[in-house]
Image (cartoon, rainbow, N blue to C red):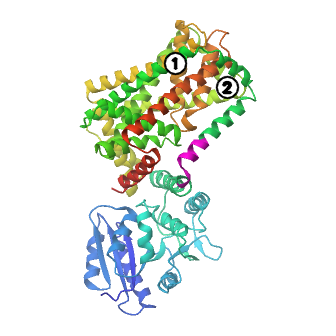
Amino acid sequence: MSDVEVSVVLPAYNEEDTIEETVSVTLETLASFLPAGAFEVVVAEDGCDDRTPEIASRLAGEDDRVRHVHSDERLGRGGALEYAFERADGETLVYFDTDLATDMRHLEELVESVRSGEYDVATGSRWLPENRADRPAKRGVPSLGYNTLVRGFLRSDLQDHQCGFKAFDRDALETLLPEVADEHWFWDTELLVKAQRRGLRVKEFPVDWESKGDSKVDIVRDVFGMGSQILRTWWELSVQPRITRRVSLGAGTLLVAVALLLMTQYLDPRTVLDEMAGASVPLVGVSVLVYALSWPLRGARYRDILDTMGYHERWEFLTGAVFVSQTGNLVFPARAGDAVRAYVVKARRSIPYPTGFASLAVERVFDLLTITLLAGVVLIGLAATGSAGDLLSALTGGTVGGDTAASGQTAVAVAAGVGVAAIGAVLAIVASARTDRNFVRAAVGRLSDDSYADYVAGVVERFVADIQTVTGDGRSFLRVGGTSLAIWGLDVVTALVVFAAFGHSLTPSLIAVGFFAVSVGNLAKVLPLTPGGVGLYEGAFTIIVVPLTPPGIGVATALSVAIVDHAVKNAVTVLGGVGSMAWLNVSLTTAVEESRSATDVEADA
């Protein structure tokens, strides 16, 4: 059994110029307050491509208090620390940055805070009033902003989460690590936040700190990486535990009720109700049947996408899986239902999670392209007939006033952005498929040279490759694209039948306007800004229909048609989802939780 009580881990990546001095200073400082044989220094060398491995091996050979832990590939700061801590012998585990920016006279307080048993975690801080820290503005301002976000979103009581000067009790750390998802720069922040949530004893004390070396804002690491990790952890700790089926349904219902109440400020609800009461019930029933016809096509399209990826399933099962996932999107916020489908095909047909998520992404791209194409064709027609000016007037509030115009403008702006982004992304992906150059890694590399960039590039590469698989196969592309046109064509026909139910003749101009209104409405609700897109769809639909149709179709009529049309589609989705859940023996809440867990596992892998 080892006599080592304290293990100090030095995370090292390309530190050939400093590592030898850092090890020497560390050994000397530890020896000043710990007995001989009670400590070790572990150089956690993280896939270096300079002379750091050779130097670390030599130091370990010359002094039995030094150990060299090597990784063939870069693990990231968090990953390298975990790897080294697992191999360390001490019960008190310490790490600090190898540039020795923190004054080493604080090392005894750091170690003894945990070694004494008084605290489970100890961390230095550069933001307490008592400390002395030389922080240039290019480091101080981003650090202050970051720590403010962590305290606000994650309810942390600490002032400084990223000072590279921390100690942990081994038992406490081992209980925390399974809950920590990040392996890069957010690792220690997540540890500190979750230690506080678990009620562990955390000590933060002031340290003298001096900036060493250069520092720059890394877009991938600091903005994409750290920002997204704050949001992920906030969702995990503050939102996810509260999302039950009852809460989600209640919240969605409340939001819809609030939206309806707000409508009364600029539109008499009795007028809308009178309009809806006059609708032909048999024709509304026909619209239900028309929309229901699109669902087998959704299953067939999903089958074709999976066929291209090497998985062959029956369209009936896949239709049920699509029903369940779309019902989840209506019930749960943030399109959580999308991940449910990956869970269903994995649990019932053993299709791997990466394939499930990738196939869903491919389907979404075809949806966006098809809807954008429909909207674009009709917009060109409107411009050719001179009706585009009326639409522009509506979008600037000249034809439809008040909050209707505002909601419609927001919806159309969202729709335009989504459509342009979809077209641009697919054009770039198709173009990149015709060359051997790796545009993804090159683009990410221009933004960042951090290890986190490799992870981000890998995720994007997998997504791009899956889309290229389908778009690169001409027959598959035509089959999936043709089915997509049929699906969204039926979506538009459903709305046109609802127009007929309200007594309006389906003239060529109304059909064209209907295609455009439904297409823009569906683009607007792609982003999860409201549950099920309620409000965005109706707003976009109304603001487009009113100025482009005869005077007989006013705001109340257009809004009534939009409400009934959307209600028909949501009702068919929910009924199909409930039936599919019973048939496939799937619990929606269980599927959401399992799919989130699977996402975390895939990220770890």
Above or below, 8 relative to 328: below
In the visual, does 396 lie left or right of 456?
Answer: right
Q: Residue reaching furthest bottom?
A: 35
Q: Which residues are magenta?
A: 241-251
- Choose between 446 and 263: the one closer to the eye: 263
Dot 1 alpha-carbon crowd within 10 angstroms: few under 14, some 14 to 19, many 20 or more: some
The amino acid at mark 1 is: Gly
The answer to whether the residues at label 1 and label 2 have Cβ atoms under 8 Å apart is no
Quadrant into which the N terminus falls? bottom left
Identify which amino acid the numbered label 2 is placed on.
Ala
**390 relative to 450 in the view: left or right:** right
> Magenta stretch: dominant SS?
helix
Closer mark to the observer between disc 1 and disc 2: 1
Between the residue at mark 1 and the residue at mark 2, the CA separation in whole angstroms equals 30 Å
Image position of 139 (left or right of 308): right
Tell me the quarter of the picture where residue 357 sits: top left
Which quadrant: the C terminus? bottom left
| Marking on residue 405 | 2
Which residue is nearer to you in this view: 542 or 136? 542
- Res 383 → quadrant: top right
Residue 568: tell me if it is visible.
Answer: yes
Q: Is residue 398 visible?
A: no
Q: Which mark is residue 372?
A: none
Q: Which mark is residue 285?
A: 1
Is residue 445 placed above or below 485 in the rendered structure?
below
Q: Return the residue nearer the eye: 316 or 301.
A: 316
Residue 462 position in % (x across, y down): 32, 43
Q: Is residue 248 magenta?
A: yes
- First in sequence: mark 1 or mark 2? 1
